[in-house]
Image: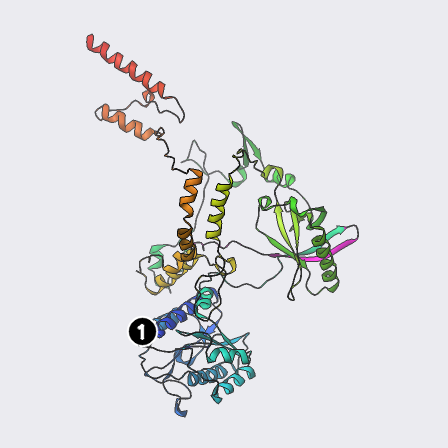
Amino acid sequence: ATPAFAVGTDEGAKVTKAAVALRMARNLAQQKLLFMPKHELGVAFFGSAETCNDLQHDGYENVDVKLRGQLEPASLDVLRLLSAPPLGGVEADAVNALIVAIDWLIRRTREAKYGSKTIHMFTDGHSASMDDSDVHECVGQLAAHGARLLVTPIGAPTEGPWAALAAASAQVDVVPLSALARQCSMSVKPVETRAKVRLSLQIGPGLSIPVGVYSRTTRVTFPTLKKRSKPAAGVPEEHRKTEAVVVERTYHLADDPEGEEVKPEDRVKGHRYGQSIVPMSEYDEAALMYTCDRTLCALGFASAASVGPEHSVHHVEAVAADRGDAWAFCAFESLVDAMTAESAVLIARYSFRQNAQPRMVALMPRKGGDGRASTMDMQYLPFFEDMREWTCPSLAAPSPEQRAAVAALVGAMTVGGSAAPAPGEPAHELFRPEDTHNPALSRFYSFVVQRALKPGAPVPPAGPESLSTCQRPAHVEARLEAEKAAERLREKFGLKKVEKGQGRRKRFWREAIAEKRKEAGFGEVDTKRIKVYAKGEKKEEDDEDKVKTEGAADGDGAA
Protein backbone atom coordinates (compact mmCIF):
# COMPACT_ATOMS: atom_id res chain seq x y z
CA ALA A 1 0.00 0.00 0.00
CA THR A 2 1.08 3.55 -0.65
CA PRO A 3 -0.93 5.46 1.91
CA ALA A 4 0.01 9.09 1.48
CA PHE A 5 1.28 11.70 -0.92
CA ALA A 6 2.47 14.80 0.93
CA VAL A 7 2.74 17.79 -1.38
CA GLY A 8 4.43 21.08 -0.50
CA THR A 9 4.03 24.48 -2.18
CA ASP A 10 6.32 27.15 -3.51
CA GLU A 11 4.97 30.28 -5.19
CA GLY A 12 8.26 31.95 -6.07
CA ALA A 13 9.02 30.19 -9.37
CA LYS A 14 7.28 30.14 -12.71
CA VAL A 15 6.86 26.37 -12.45
CA THR A 16 6.23 25.85 -8.76
CA LYS A 17 7.53 22.98 -6.70
CA ALA A 18 3.95 22.06 -5.92
CA ALA A 19 3.19 21.72 -9.64
CA VAL A 20 6.17 19.40 -10.07
CA ALA A 21 5.15 17.37 -7.03
CA LEU A 22 1.56 17.08 -8.23
CA ARG A 23 2.68 15.93 -11.65
CA MET A 24 4.92 13.22 -10.20
CA ALA A 25 2.15 12.13 -7.81
CA ARG A 26 -0.26 11.85 -10.75
CA ASN A 27 2.25 9.77 -12.69
CA LEU A 28 2.72 7.47 -9.70
CA ALA A 29 -1.04 7.09 -9.17
CA GLN A 30 -1.54 6.50 -12.90
CA GLN A 31 1.03 3.71 -12.88
CA LYS A 32 -0.71 2.03 -9.97
CA LEU A 33 -4.08 2.43 -11.67
CA LEU A 34 -2.89 0.73 -14.86
CA PHE A 35 -0.40 -1.88 -13.66
CA MET A 36 -0.89 -2.32 -9.88
CA PRO A 37 -4.67 -2.30 -9.42
CA LYS A 38 -4.49 -4.15 -6.10
CA HIS A 39 -2.32 -1.49 -4.44
CA GLU A 40 -4.28 0.74 -2.08
CA LEU A 41 -3.38 4.37 -1.60
CA GLY A 42 -4.50 7.59 -0.05
CA VAL A 43 -3.76 11.26 -0.63
CA ALA A 44 -2.87 13.99 1.86
CA PHE A 45 -1.86 17.61 1.23
CA PHE A 46 0.08 19.72 3.70
CA GLY A 47 0.46 23.46 3.47
CA SER A 48 -3.22 23.65 2.50
CA ALA A 49 -5.69 26.28 3.67
CA GLU A 50 -8.06 23.58 4.92
CA THR A 51 -7.44 21.13 7.76
CA CYS A 52 -8.96 17.64 7.78
CA ASN A 53 -7.23 14.84 9.68
CA ASP A 54 -7.63 12.72 12.80
CA LEU A 55 -5.06 14.78 14.77
CA GLN A 56 -6.32 18.26 13.96
CA HIS A 57 -7.58 18.74 17.54
CA ASP A 58 -4.03 18.15 18.76
CA GLY A 59 -2.64 21.09 16.80
CA TYR A 60 -1.76 19.41 13.50
CA GLU A 61 -3.24 22.02 11.20
CA ASN A 62 -3.02 22.67 7.46
CA VAL A 63 -2.88 18.94 6.70
CA ASP A 64 -5.78 17.87 4.49
CA VAL A 65 -6.43 14.11 4.20
CA LYS A 66 -8.55 13.23 1.17
CA LEU A 67 -10.60 10.22 0.03
CA ARG A 68 -12.63 10.32 3.24
CA GLY A 69 -9.54 9.23 5.13
CA GLN A 70 -9.62 5.76 3.56
CA LEU A 71 -7.11 3.60 1.70
CA GLU A 72 -8.53 2.37 -1.58
CA PRO A 73 -7.28 1.09 -4.95
CA ALA A 74 -6.16 3.70 -7.43
CA SER A 75 -9.03 5.11 -9.48
CA LEU A 76 -9.87 7.98 -11.77
CA ASP A 77 -11.12 9.89 -8.72
CA VAL A 78 -7.57 9.94 -7.36
CA LEU A 79 -6.27 11.36 -10.64
CA ARG A 80 -9.00 14.01 -10.67
CA LEU A 81 -8.12 14.92 -7.09
CA LEU A 82 -4.45 15.35 -7.95
CA SER A 83 -5.39 17.40 -11.03
CA ALA A 84 -7.44 19.83 -8.92
CA PRO A 85 -5.66 20.17 -5.54
CA PRO A 86 -7.07 22.24 -2.67
CA LEU A 87 -6.08 25.83 -2.10
CA GLY A 88 -2.60 26.17 -0.60
CA GLY A 89 -0.28 29.03 0.22
CA VAL A 90 -0.01 28.32 3.95
CA GLU A 91 3.32 27.67 5.63
CA ALA A 92 3.95 23.91 5.49
CA ASP A 93 5.38 21.66 8.17
CA ALA A 94 6.63 18.40 6.65
CA VAL A 95 7.24 16.75 10.03
CA ASN A 96 3.66 17.40 11.15
CA ALA A 97 2.43 15.96 7.85
CA LEU A 98 4.60 12.89 8.39
CA ILE A 99 3.17 12.38 11.89
CA VAL A 100 -0.39 12.60 10.51
CA ALA A 101 0.49 10.16 7.72
CA ILE A 102 2.01 7.60 10.10
CA ASP A 103 -0.98 7.82 12.44
CA TRP A 104 -3.30 7.46 9.46
CA LEU A 105 -1.33 4.45 8.20
CA ILE A 106 -1.42 2.69 11.57
CA ARG A 107 -5.17 3.23 12.00
CA ARG A 108 -6.10 2.00 8.52
CA THR A 109 -3.80 -1.04 8.37
CA ARG A 110 -4.19 -2.33 11.93
CA GLU A 111 -6.93 -4.84 11.12
CA ALA A 112 -5.67 -5.92 7.67
CA LYS A 113 -2.55 -7.67 6.45
CA TYR A 114 -0.45 -5.87 3.85
CA GLY A 115 2.65 -7.08 2.07
CA SER A 116 4.30 -3.67 2.28
CA LYS A 117 3.42 -0.26 3.69
CA THR A 118 5.01 2.86 2.27
CA ILE A 119 4.66 6.61 2.73
CA HIS A 120 5.87 8.60 -0.29
CA MET A 121 6.49 12.24 0.53
CA PHE A 122 7.11 15.02 -2.01
CA THR A 123 8.62 17.98 -0.23
CA ASP A 124 11.45 20.50 -0.22
CA GLY A 125 14.88 19.07 0.46
CA HIS A 126 15.33 21.22 3.58
CA SER A 127 11.89 20.73 5.15
CA ALA A 128 13.24 18.69 8.09
CA SER A 129 16.08 18.83 10.57
CA MET A 130 18.11 16.01 12.09
CA ASP A 131 17.94 17.82 15.44
CA ASP A 132 14.13 17.52 15.57
CA SER A 133 13.20 14.81 18.07
CA ASP A 134 9.88 14.23 16.29
CA VAL A 135 11.76 13.05 13.21
CA HIS A 136 13.52 10.27 15.12
CA GLU A 137 10.25 9.33 16.82
CA CYS A 138 8.66 8.99 13.37
CA VAL A 139 11.48 6.70 12.24
CA GLY A 140 10.94 4.55 15.33
CA GLN A 141 7.21 4.24 14.59
CA LEU A 142 7.95 3.27 11.00
CA ALA A 143 10.28 0.49 12.15
CA ALA A 144 7.80 -0.73 14.77
CA HIS A 145 5.02 -1.17 12.21
CA GLY A 146 7.13 -2.40 9.28
CA ALA A 147 6.60 0.68 7.11
CA ARG A 148 8.97 2.65 4.91
CA LEU A 149 9.32 6.32 4.09
CA LEU A 150 10.31 7.39 0.57
CA VAL A 151 11.19 11.06 0.19
CA THR A 152 11.50 12.80 -3.18
CA PRO A 153 13.05 16.26 -2.76
CA ILE A 154 11.61 18.85 -5.13
CA GLY A 155 13.86 21.64 -6.36
CA ALA A 156 16.70 20.82 -3.96
CA PRO A 157 19.78 18.58 -3.99
CA THR A 158 19.58 15.13 -2.46
CA GLU A 159 22.30 15.82 0.15
CA GLY A 160 19.94 17.57 2.60
CA PRO A 161 18.67 16.38 5.97
CA TRP A 162 16.50 13.70 4.38
CA ALA A 163 19.60 12.10 2.88
CA ALA A 164 21.29 12.14 6.28
CA LEU A 165 18.19 10.56 7.80
CA ALA A 166 18.19 7.87 5.10
CA ALA A 167 21.84 7.10 5.79
CA ALA A 168 21.09 6.66 9.49
CA SER A 169 17.92 4.57 9.14
CA ALA A 170 16.98 1.60 6.96
CA GLN A 171 13.32 2.68 7.04
CA VAL A 172 13.97 5.90 5.10
CA ASP A 173 15.14 6.23 1.53
CA VAL A 174 15.59 9.22 -0.77
CA VAL A 175 14.28 8.75 -4.33
CA PRO A 176 15.66 11.41 -6.71
CA LEU A 177 13.22 13.08 -9.06
CA SER A 178 14.85 11.63 -12.17
CA ALA A 179 14.81 8.10 -10.75
CA LEU A 180 11.13 8.42 -9.85
CA ALA A 181 10.35 9.72 -13.36
CA ARG A 182 12.03 6.65 -14.89
CA GLN A 183 10.14 4.40 -12.49
CA CYS A 184 6.78 5.99 -13.30
CA SER A 185 7.37 5.62 -17.05
CA MET A 186 7.50 1.82 -16.73
CA SER A 187 4.58 0.51 -18.80
CA VAL A 188 4.37 -3.14 -17.71
CA LYS A 189 3.01 -5.02 -14.74
CA PRO A 190 5.67 -6.08 -12.24
CA VAL A 191 5.98 -9.85 -12.17
CA GLU A 192 7.65 -12.22 -9.77
CA THR A 193 10.64 -14.14 -11.09
CA ARG A 194 9.45 -17.71 -11.46
CA ALA A 195 10.79 -20.61 -13.47
CA LYS A 196 8.75 -21.11 -16.63
CA VAL A 197 10.09 -24.67 -16.89
CA ARG A 198 11.56 -26.93 -14.22
CA LEU A 199 13.36 -30.02 -15.47
CA SER A 200 16.73 -31.79 -15.30
CA LEU A 201 19.81 -31.03 -17.36
CA GLN A 202 20.81 -34.45 -18.66
CA ILE A 203 24.61 -34.56 -18.72
CA GLY A 204 25.06 -38.29 -19.26
CA PRO A 205 23.69 -41.70 -18.29
CA GLY A 206 22.69 -41.51 -14.64
CA LEU A 207 23.88 -37.89 -14.26
CA SER A 208 21.42 -34.98 -14.28
CA ILE A 209 21.18 -31.61 -12.54
CA PRO A 210 17.75 -30.20 -11.53
CA VAL A 211 17.48 -26.74 -13.12
CA GLY A 212 14.91 -24.06 -13.85
CA VAL A 213 14.51 -22.01 -17.04
CA TYR A 214 13.76 -18.30 -16.56
CA SER A 215 12.85 -15.57 -19.06
CA ARG A 216 15.52 -12.89 -19.36
CA THR A 217 13.72 -10.79 -21.95
CA THR A 218 10.10 -10.84 -23.09
CA ARG A 219 8.79 -8.46 -25.71
CA VAL A 220 5.99 -6.27 -24.36
CA THR A 221 3.44 -5.37 -27.03
CA PHE A 222 0.55 -2.95 -27.16
CA PRO A 223 -2.64 -4.19 -25.50
CA THR A 224 -5.23 -5.49 -27.90
CA LEU A 225 -8.13 -3.14 -28.54
CA LYS A 226 -11.35 -5.12 -28.26
CA LYS A 227 -14.16 -4.42 -30.70
CA ARG A 228 -17.25 -3.08 -28.97
CA SER A 229 -20.77 -2.33 -30.16
CA LYS A 230 -21.57 1.39 -30.20
CA PRO A 231 -25.38 0.88 -30.05
CA ALA A 232 -24.98 -1.48 -27.09
CA ALA A 233 -22.91 1.10 -25.23
CA GLY A 234 -25.92 3.41 -25.21
CA VAL A 235 -28.15 0.85 -23.46
CA PRO A 236 -28.42 1.31 -19.65
CA GLU A 237 -26.23 -1.05 -17.67
CA GLU A 238 -29.18 -2.74 -15.94
CA HIS A 239 -30.58 -3.78 -19.34
CA ARG A 240 -27.31 -4.40 -21.18
CA LYS A 241 -26.03 -7.95 -21.24
CA THR A 242 -22.79 -7.34 -23.11
CA GLU A 243 -21.24 -4.85 -25.49
CA ALA A 244 -18.73 -7.27 -26.97
CA VAL A 245 -18.95 -8.03 -30.69
CA VAL A 246 -19.38 -11.72 -31.53
CA VAL A 247 -17.66 -12.92 -34.69
CA GLU A 248 -19.40 -15.70 -36.61
CA ARG A 249 -17.57 -17.32 -39.53
CA THR A 250 -19.21 -19.41 -42.22
CA TYR A 251 -17.69 -21.35 -45.11
CA HIS A 252 -19.14 -21.58 -48.62
CA LEU A 253 -17.93 -22.92 -51.94
CA ALA A 254 -15.77 -20.43 -53.84
CA ASP A 255 -17.89 -20.73 -57.00
CA ASP A 256 -21.17 -20.54 -55.06
CA PRO A 257 -20.79 -17.98 -52.24
CA GLU A 258 -24.57 -17.65 -51.84
CA GLY A 259 -25.14 -21.40 -51.60
CA GLU A 260 -25.42 -23.73 -48.68
CA GLU A 261 -22.82 -23.54 -45.92
CA VAL A 262 -20.13 -26.24 -45.93
CA LYS A 263 -20.49 -28.28 -42.75
CA PRO A 264 -17.49 -28.85 -40.43
CA GLU A 265 -17.38 -32.58 -41.21
CA ASP A 266 -17.12 -31.74 -44.92
CA ARG A 267 -14.17 -29.39 -44.51
CA VAL A 268 -10.54 -30.51 -44.62
CA LYS A 269 -7.24 -28.64 -44.54
CA GLY A 270 -4.89 -28.75 -47.50
CA HIS A 271 -1.32 -27.96 -48.52
CA ARG A 272 -0.76 -26.24 -51.87
CA TYR A 273 1.78 -28.17 -53.91
CA GLY A 274 2.31 -26.52 -57.28
CA GLN A 275 -1.06 -26.09 -58.97
CA SER A 276 -2.81 -28.72 -56.87
CA ILE A 277 -3.90 -28.88 -53.23
CA VAL A 278 -2.91 -31.92 -51.18
CA PRO A 279 -5.60 -32.67 -48.57
CA MET A 280 -4.49 -33.28 -45.01
CA SER A 281 -6.92 -34.33 -42.31
CA GLU A 282 -6.53 -33.84 -38.58
CA TYR A 283 -5.54 -37.49 -38.27
CA ASP A 284 -2.72 -36.93 -40.76
CA GLU A 285 -1.55 -33.93 -38.76
CA ALA A 286 -1.52 -35.97 -35.56
CA ALA A 287 0.44 -38.78 -37.25
CA LEU A 288 3.04 -36.33 -38.60
CA MET A 289 3.46 -34.53 -35.25
CA TYR A 290 6.92 -34.86 -33.71
CA THR A 291 6.77 -36.83 -30.48
CA CYS A 292 9.29 -36.37 -27.69
CA ASP A 293 9.51 -35.93 -23.94
CA ARG A 294 10.19 -32.71 -22.10
CA THR A 295 13.97 -32.58 -21.94
CA LEU A 296 17.16 -30.54 -21.77
CA CYS A 297 19.78 -33.00 -22.95
CA ALA A 298 23.46 -32.10 -23.33
CA LEU A 299 24.85 -33.05 -26.74
CA GLY A 300 28.42 -31.79 -26.40
CA PHE A 301 30.69 -28.83 -25.72
CA ALA A 302 31.91 -26.31 -28.29
CA SER A 303 34.23 -23.33 -28.30
CA ALA A 304 32.61 -20.12 -27.12
CA ALA A 305 33.98 -18.36 -30.22
CA SER A 306 31.97 -20.66 -32.51
CA VAL A 307 28.61 -19.27 -31.35
CA GLY A 308 27.96 -15.63 -32.16
CA PRO A 309 25.03 -13.24 -31.86
CA GLU A 310 24.08 -13.93 -35.49
CA HIS A 311 23.15 -17.46 -34.45
CA SER A 312 20.29 -16.32 -32.19
CA VAL A 313 16.77 -16.86 -33.52
CA HIS A 314 14.74 -16.35 -30.34
CA HIS A 315 14.70 -14.37 -27.13
CA VAL A 316 17.33 -15.19 -24.50
CA GLU A 317 16.49 -17.26 -21.45
CA ALA A 318 18.50 -18.14 -18.35
CA VAL A 319 19.13 -21.56 -16.82
CA ALA A 320 19.89 -21.77 -13.09
CA ALA A 321 20.09 -24.49 -10.47
CA ASP A 322 16.78 -25.47 -8.93
CA ARG A 323 15.92 -23.37 -5.88
CA GLY A 324 16.36 -25.04 -2.52
CA ASP A 325 18.46 -27.92 -3.88
CA ALA A 326 21.95 -27.67 -2.36
CA TRP A 327 23.36 -30.55 -4.42
CA ALA A 328 22.05 -29.04 -7.66
CA PHE A 329 23.57 -25.67 -6.75
CA CYS A 330 26.98 -27.22 -6.07
CA ALA A 331 26.97 -29.30 -9.28
CA PHE A 332 25.76 -26.38 -11.42
CA GLU A 333 28.39 -24.00 -10.00
CA SER A 334 31.12 -26.59 -10.72
CA LEU A 335 29.90 -26.97 -14.31
CA VAL A 336 29.87 -23.20 -14.84
CA ASP A 337 33.41 -22.89 -13.40
CA ALA A 338 34.72 -25.61 -15.71
CA MET A 339 33.04 -24.11 -18.81
CA THR A 340 34.35 -20.65 -17.96
CA ALA A 341 37.89 -21.96 -17.54
CA GLU A 342 37.74 -23.82 -20.88
CA SER A 343 35.91 -20.99 -22.73
CA ALA A 344 33.28 -23.50 -23.80
CA VAL A 345 29.54 -23.51 -24.37
CA LEU A 346 27.19 -26.45 -23.97
CA ILE A 347 25.15 -27.53 -27.02
CA ALA A 348 21.89 -29.16 -25.95
CA ARG A 349 18.51 -30.33 -27.26
CA TYR A 350 15.64 -28.54 -25.57
CA SER A 351 11.92 -29.25 -25.58
CA PHE A 352 9.98 -27.23 -23.02
CA ARG A 353 6.99 -29.58 -22.99
CA GLN A 354 6.03 -33.01 -24.23
CA ASN A 355 5.69 -33.33 -28.02
CA ALA A 356 6.90 -29.76 -28.56
CA GLN A 357 9.18 -29.09 -31.50
CA PRO A 358 12.77 -29.67 -30.32
CA ARG A 359 15.23 -26.79 -30.47
CA MET A 360 19.00 -26.69 -30.58
CA VAL A 361 20.30 -24.35 -27.89
CA ALA A 362 23.67 -23.12 -26.68
CA LEU A 363 24.16 -22.68 -22.92
CA MET A 364 26.71 -19.95 -22.20
CA PRO A 365 28.16 -19.79 -18.68
CA ARG A 366 27.76 -16.60 -16.66
CA LYS A 367 29.61 -16.53 -13.36
CA GLY A 368 27.66 -15.02 -10.49
CA GLY A 369 28.95 -12.46 -8.02
CA ASP A 370 27.90 -10.24 -5.12
CA GLY A 371 25.83 -13.03 -3.60
CA ARG A 372 24.16 -14.01 -6.87
CA ALA A 373 24.19 -17.57 -8.18
CA SER A 374 25.77 -18.50 -11.50
CA THR A 375 23.54 -18.98 -14.53
CA MET A 376 23.74 -20.08 -18.14
CA ASP A 377 22.30 -17.94 -20.93
CA MET A 378 20.22 -20.10 -23.26
CA GLN A 379 20.57 -19.01 -26.88
CA TYR A 380 18.34 -20.67 -29.45
CA LEU A 381 20.37 -21.85 -32.47
CA PRO A 382 19.09 -21.96 -36.06
CA PHE A 383 18.78 -25.08 -38.16
CA PHE A 384 20.12 -25.23 -41.70
CA GLU A 385 16.76 -24.12 -43.12
CA ASP A 386 16.84 -21.03 -40.90
CA MET A 387 20.22 -19.81 -42.13
CA ARG A 388 20.68 -17.04 -44.69
CA GLU A 389 24.02 -16.97 -46.44
CA TRP A 390 25.91 -13.71 -46.74
CA THR A 391 26.17 -13.03 -50.47
CA CYS A 392 27.67 -9.53 -50.49
CA PRO A 393 31.34 -9.41 -51.56
CA SER A 394 33.99 -7.77 -49.40
CA LEU A 395 34.98 -4.19 -50.11
CA ALA A 396 38.46 -2.85 -50.60
CA ALA A 397 40.58 -2.48 -47.46
CA PRO A 398 40.31 1.05 -46.00
CA SER A 399 43.33 3.31 -45.88
CA PRO A 400 44.87 4.56 -42.60
CA GLU A 401 43.28 7.97 -43.17
CA GLN A 402 39.86 6.40 -43.57
CA ARG A 403 40.35 4.34 -40.42
CA ALA A 404 41.32 7.47 -38.51
CA ALA A 405 38.18 9.28 -39.72
CA VAL A 406 35.95 6.42 -38.59
CA ALA A 407 37.81 6.20 -35.27
CA ALA A 408 37.10 9.88 -34.70
CA LEU A 409 33.41 9.26 -35.44
CA VAL A 410 33.27 6.35 -32.98
CA GLY A 411 35.08 8.36 -30.31
CA ALA A 412 32.73 11.31 -30.69
CA MET A 413 29.60 9.14 -30.54
CA THR A 414 30.69 6.93 -27.65
CA VAL A 415 28.07 7.27 -24.92
CA GLY A 416 29.16 6.80 -21.33
CA GLY A 417 27.55 8.56 -18.42
CA SER A 418 25.24 11.53 -18.75
CA ALA A 419 27.11 14.72 -19.55
CA ALA A 420 25.34 16.93 -16.99
CA PRO A 421 23.51 14.98 -14.27
CA ALA A 422 21.17 16.79 -11.92
CA PRO A 423 22.78 18.36 -8.84
CA GLY A 424 23.40 15.74 -6.19
CA GLU A 425 22.58 12.82 -8.50
CA PRO A 426 25.16 10.36 -9.85
CA ALA A 427 25.79 10.12 -13.57
CA HIS A 428 23.87 7.23 -15.14
CA GLU A 429 24.73 5.26 -18.24
CA LEU A 430 22.89 6.43 -21.34
CA PHE A 431 20.66 4.03 -23.30
CA ARG A 432 21.03 1.37 -20.63
CA PRO A 433 18.22 -1.13 -21.36
CA GLU A 434 17.36 -1.42 -17.66
CA ASP A 435 16.71 2.35 -17.53
CA THR A 436 15.26 2.97 -21.01
CA HIS A 437 11.49 2.65 -21.19
CA ASN A 438 9.39 2.22 -24.32
CA PRO A 439 8.24 5.77 -25.24
CA ALA A 440 5.38 4.50 -27.42
CA LEU A 441 3.86 2.43 -24.60
CA SER A 442 4.23 5.28 -22.13
CA ARG A 443 2.48 7.71 -24.47
CA PHE A 444 -0.30 5.21 -25.25
CA TYR A 445 -1.18 4.57 -21.60
CA SER A 446 -1.03 8.28 -20.77
CA PHE A 447 -3.52 8.94 -23.56
CA VAL A 448 -5.78 6.10 -22.35
CA VAL A 449 -6.00 7.70 -18.90
CA GLN A 450 -6.53 11.15 -20.40
CA ARG A 451 -9.33 9.84 -22.62
CA ALA A 452 -10.90 8.07 -19.62
CA LEU A 453 -10.93 11.34 -17.67
CA LYS A 454 -12.21 13.33 -20.65
CA PRO A 455 -13.88 11.23 -23.38
CA GLY A 456 -13.43 13.88 -26.08
CA ALA A 457 -9.76 14.56 -25.38
CA PRO A 458 -7.64 14.79 -28.58
CA VAL A 459 -4.44 12.84 -29.07
CA PRO A 460 -1.68 15.03 -27.61
CA PRO A 461 1.63 15.49 -29.42
CA ALA A 462 4.62 13.50 -28.25
CA GLY A 463 6.13 15.12 -25.17
CA PRO A 464 9.82 15.84 -24.58
CA GLU A 465 10.17 12.69 -22.48
CA SER A 466 9.06 10.49 -25.39
CA LEU A 467 11.15 12.32 -27.96
CA SER A 468 14.35 12.30 -25.92
CA THR A 469 14.32 8.58 -25.17
CA CYS A 470 15.58 7.40 -28.57
CA GLN A 471 17.38 10.53 -29.73
CA ARG A 472 21.05 11.38 -29.84
CA PRO A 473 22.18 13.20 -26.65
CA ALA A 474 23.06 16.87 -26.89
CA HIS A 475 26.66 16.40 -25.69
CA VAL A 476 27.21 13.77 -28.42
CA GLU A 477 25.97 16.25 -31.02
CA ALA A 478 28.38 18.82 -29.64
CA ARG A 479 31.32 16.40 -29.87
CA LEU A 480 30.42 15.49 -33.45
CA GLU A 481 30.33 19.17 -34.31
CA ALA A 482 33.68 19.82 -32.63
CA GLU A 483 35.38 16.83 -34.29
CA LYS A 484 33.83 17.66 -37.70
CA ALA A 485 33.25 13.95 -38.15
CA ALA A 486 30.80 14.29 -41.04
CA GLU A 487 33.16 16.50 -43.05
CA ARG A 488 36.07 14.12 -42.49
CA LEU A 489 34.03 11.14 -43.63
CA ARG A 490 32.90 12.89 -46.80
CA GLU A 491 36.46 13.97 -47.51
CA LYS A 492 38.10 10.58 -46.96
CA PHE A 493 35.41 8.36 -48.47
CA GLY A 494 34.00 10.66 -51.16
CA LEU A 495 30.46 10.09 -50.01
CA LYS A 496 27.73 11.49 -52.23
CA LYS A 497 24.02 11.01 -52.48
CA VAL A 498 22.95 8.61 -55.21
CA GLU A 499 19.72 9.67 -56.85
CA LYS A 500 17.38 6.80 -57.52
CA GLY A 501 16.34 6.53 -61.14
CA GLN A 502 12.70 6.84 -62.07
CA GLY A 503 11.58 3.33 -63.01
CA ARG A 504 8.48 2.17 -64.80
CA ARG A 505 5.31 2.78 -62.91
CA LYS A 506 3.18 -0.29 -62.48
CA ARG A 507 -0.25 -0.03 -64.11
CA PHE A 508 -3.40 -1.59 -62.74
CA TRP A 509 -6.60 -2.70 -64.44
CA ARG A 510 -8.64 0.12 -62.99
CA GLU A 511 -6.23 2.71 -64.45
CA ALA A 512 -6.23 1.08 -67.88
CA ILE A 513 -10.03 0.83 -67.95
CA ALA A 514 -10.39 4.47 -66.91
CA GLU A 515 -7.99 5.55 -69.66
CA LYS A 516 -9.80 3.56 -72.36
CA ARG A 517 -13.14 4.84 -71.14
CA LYS A 518 -11.97 8.40 -71.71
CA GLU A 519 -10.88 7.53 -75.24
CA ALA A 520 -14.15 5.70 -75.96
CA GLY A 521 -16.28 8.64 -74.86
CA PHE A 522 -17.68 6.91 -71.79
CA GLY A 523 -18.86 3.98 -73.87
CA GLU A 524 -18.53 0.28 -73.17
CA VAL A 525 -14.91 -0.79 -72.75
CA ASP A 526 -13.68 -4.06 -74.25
CA THR A 527 -11.32 -5.30 -71.55
CA LYS A 528 -9.92 -8.02 -73.81
CA ARG A 529 -8.15 -5.41 -75.91
CA ILE A 530 -6.55 -3.72 -72.92
CA LYS A 531 -2.97 -4.71 -72.22
CA VAL A 532 -1.48 -4.15 -68.76
CA TYR A 533 2.25 -4.73 -68.81
CA ALA A 534 3.80 -6.78 -66.05
CA LYS A 535 6.75 -5.45 -64.14
CA GLY A 536 10.01 -5.88 -66.05
CA GLU A 537 8.68 -5.97 -69.61
CA LYS A 538 10.79 -4.08 -72.13
CA LYS A 539 9.87 -0.62 -73.20
CA GLU A 540 10.48 -1.51 -76.87
CA GLU A 541 7.16 -3.38 -76.91
CA ASP A 542 5.36 -0.14 -76.04
CA ASP A 543 7.16 1.74 -78.82
CA GLU A 544 6.40 -1.02 -81.36
CA ASP A 545 2.70 -1.03 -80.51
CA LYS A 546 2.66 2.74 -80.73
CA VAL A 547 4.19 2.70 -84.23
CA LYS A 548 1.68 0.08 -85.37
CA THR A 549 -1.21 2.14 -84.05
CA GLU A 550 0.00 5.29 -85.75
CA GLY A 551 0.49 3.37 -89.00
CA ALA A 552 -3.01 2.00 -88.86
CA ALA A 553 -4.39 5.47 -88.23
CA ASP A 554 -2.53 6.88 -91.24
CA GLY A 555 -3.87 4.06 -93.39
CA ASP A 556 -7.43 4.70 -92.34
CA GLY A 557 -7.03 8.39 -93.12
CA ALA A 558 -5.76 7.64 -96.67
CA ALA A 559 -8.64 5.35 -97.34
Which residue occupies 41% across, 25% down? 536
Q: How many marks?
A: 1
Left or right of 93? Residue 391 is: right
**As drawn, which residue projects farthest toward the top?**
559
Asked if residue 276 is positioned above or below residue 200 in the image, the reply reads above
100 in the magenta segment: no
Which amino acid type is marked by label 1?
A: Ala
222 in the magenta segment: yes
Left or right of 136? Residue 342 is: right
Asked if residue 142 is positioned above or below residue 451 in the image, the reply reads below
Which residue occupies 47% across, 80% down? 161
**As drawn, which residue projects farthest toward the front?**
401
Q: Where is residue 494 drawn, in percent x and y?
A: 42, 37
Helix, strand or loop at mark 1: loop
Asked if residue 399 is positioned above or below residue 60 in the image, the reply reads above
Q: Where is residue 363 drawn, in percent x and y?
A: 66, 51
Segment colored magenta = 204-225
Q: Where is residue 72 drawn, in percent x and y?
A: 45, 74
> In which quarter of the view is residue 237 placed?
bottom left
Q: Where is residue 18 drawn, in percent x and y?
A: 35, 74
> In which quarter of the view is residue 241 placed?
bottom left
- Residue 181 in view of the camera: yes
> In which quarter of the view is residue 422 placed?
bottom left
**As drawn, which residue projects farthest toward the bottom?**
58
CA neighbours of label 1 inside 10 A, class few (<14), some (14 to 19), many (20+): few
- Residue 226 in view of the camera: no
Name the residue carrying label 1: 13
Q: Where does the C terminus fall, quadrant-wise?
A: top left
Asked if residue 76 is positioned above or below residue 266 in the image, the reply reads below
